[in-house]
């Protein structure tokens, strides 16, 4: 059963939030139409093209008691952050931010489960979004609890118009939730390497053990609300977690809104915008340089610097160039339309006119 949540497109744009490198549990079916796994739910999210105010959602199992809605509101920080207010404040003060943000609306930082977020970003090292998403899908299939079956269309190469007219083929896809600490600790390094996790397999196995020893969810929750420096210092004790991965976990799951994950890409953005001068990126970045770059964002955007970073980061992704181009095209069309109307009314003036490792394939669950 479809239900709806009142949240304006400018407060939550699905494309700009769900597939911009902060989470890897969503799949785009069409513009403003996504499916994903959140907690124990398989979720479909959809916006109508002519409705900017309502987000429609459907879940399996059905959200009869409102449990999913509570979880989703927490996930998108529905009650705590007003994105349009941040956009307005930063656009008023910073011209370069206004130019970028005006074409990328509704970017939010999601509030993920810290355990899932940690494993996800350990997998993100020297990787790209498409492959990280595929790796985590395999992890769910192998070690997570079953949720449901869903029917999906099978991609085919239609060689003729007759083939195109046929009913599209469909296949059953089994959906699993993200594994718990107890479930994933059964995984061996050899198994994970066999599933395509490479050198990250060792990091995952060791970090799972360390997280369990530290107290699991209770340890993560003990970090919430602490200053970024203390949260980062705790997280980097995990194997495979450096400053950047720690700051991703802090920003996207532990409420450290001032966290700015710094890598080559973010360094280049800071350079291009004039935030840092006279600094050269180093492959093995010192802690001092890392903090200095993050401070350049915090100086301009304050305690929500991580949110501003995410907007600027999304605006610089190759996958968002098309989104920005389409936005500029719409803006130009609206200006032209207004000028045409003005000309008709007033009678004066004229209108101005990835290459990377092969994606991991679905595999059968290993026998325990």
Image: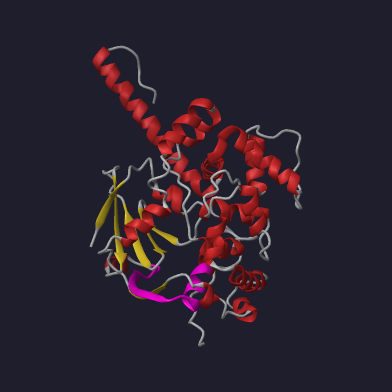
Of residues 56 and 33, the one drawn nearer to the viewer in this rendering: 56
Residue 345 locus on image (x, y percent)? 24, 16
Q: Nearer the viewer, residue 6 or 323?
A: 6
Residue occupying the point 57% across, 53% down: 250
Name the colour scheme.
Answer: secondary structure
Q: Residue furthest bottom?
A: 367
Membership of 118 in magenta stretch: no
Residue nearer the viewer, 135 or 339 = 135
**283 sits to left or right of 244:** right
Q: Provide residue 30's location: percent of width, then percent of height.
A: 36, 55
- Residue 61 sits in which quadrant? bottom left
Q: Residue at x 51, y 35 (%)?
A: 100
Above or below, 134 against 309 in this view is below
Residue at 40% x, 50% y: name it.
Answer: 14
* Number of disc labels: 0
Q: Can residue 124 be seen in this view?
A: yes
Q: Give the range drawn in magenta.
A: 136-158
Left or right: 166, with 222 as reference point? left
User: Is residue 156 found inside the magenta-colored segment of the image?
Assistant: yes
Q: In this view, does 269 lie above or below 274?
A: below
Q: Vertically, is 241 above or below 55?
A: below
Rendered residue at 40%/68% (across/down)? 157
Residue 30 appears in the rendering = no
Query: The N terminus is located in which quarter?
Result: bottom left
| Left-right relation of 110 to 204 | left
Where residue 130 sits in the image (x, y, percent)?
52, 61
Q: Is residue 136 above or below residue 87?
A: below
Percent of width and height locating residue 240: 67, 64
* Of residues 111 and 175, the one drawn nearer to the viewer in this rendering: 111
């Amino acid at each position: 059963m479809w239900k709806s949540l009142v949240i304006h497109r400018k407060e939550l744009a699905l494309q700009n939030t769900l597939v911009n490198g902060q989470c890897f549990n969503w799949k785009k079916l069409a513009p403003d139409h996504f499916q994903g796994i959140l907690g124990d739910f398989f979720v479909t999210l959809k916006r109508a093209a002519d409705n900017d105010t309502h987000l429609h959602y459907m879940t399996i199992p059905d959200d009869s008691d409102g449990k999913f809605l509570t979880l989703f509101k927490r996930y998108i920080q529905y009650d705590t952050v007003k994105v349009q207010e941040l956009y307005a404040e930063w656009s008023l003060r910073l011209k370069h931010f206004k130019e970028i943000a005006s074409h990328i609306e509704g970017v939010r930082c999601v509030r993920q489960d810290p355990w899932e977020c940690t494993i996800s970003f350990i997998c993100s090292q020297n990787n790209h979004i498409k492959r990280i998403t595929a790796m985590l899908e395999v992890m769910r299939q192998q070690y997570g609890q079953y949720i449901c079956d869903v029917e999906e269309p099978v991609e085919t190469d239609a060689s003729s118009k007759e083939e195109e007219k046929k009913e599209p083929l469909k296949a059953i896809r089994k959906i699993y939730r993200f594994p718990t600490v107890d479930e994933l600790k059964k995984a061996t390094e050899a198994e994970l390497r066999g599933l395509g996790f490479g050198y990250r397999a060792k990091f995952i196995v060791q970090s799972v053990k360390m997280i369990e020893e530290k107290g699991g969810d209770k340890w993560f929750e003990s970090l919430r609300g602490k200053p970024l420096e203390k949260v980062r210092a705790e997280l980097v004790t995990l194997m495979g977690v450096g400053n950047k991965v720690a700051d991703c976990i802090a920003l996207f799951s532990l409420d450290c809104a001032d966290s700015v994950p710094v890598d080559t890409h973010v360094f280049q953005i800071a350079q291009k915008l004039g935030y840092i001068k006279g600094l050269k990126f180093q492959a093995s970045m010192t802690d001092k340089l890392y903090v200095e770059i993050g401070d350049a964002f915090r100086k301009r955007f304050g305690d929500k610097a991580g949110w501003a970073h995410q907007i600027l980061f999304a605006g610089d992704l190759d996958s968002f160039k098309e989104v920005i181009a389409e936005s500029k095209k719409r803006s130009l069309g609206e200006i032209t339309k207004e000028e045409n109307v003005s000309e008709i009314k007033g009678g004066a003036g004229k209108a101005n006119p990835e290459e990377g490792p092969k994606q991991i394939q679905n595999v059968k669950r290993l026998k325990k």
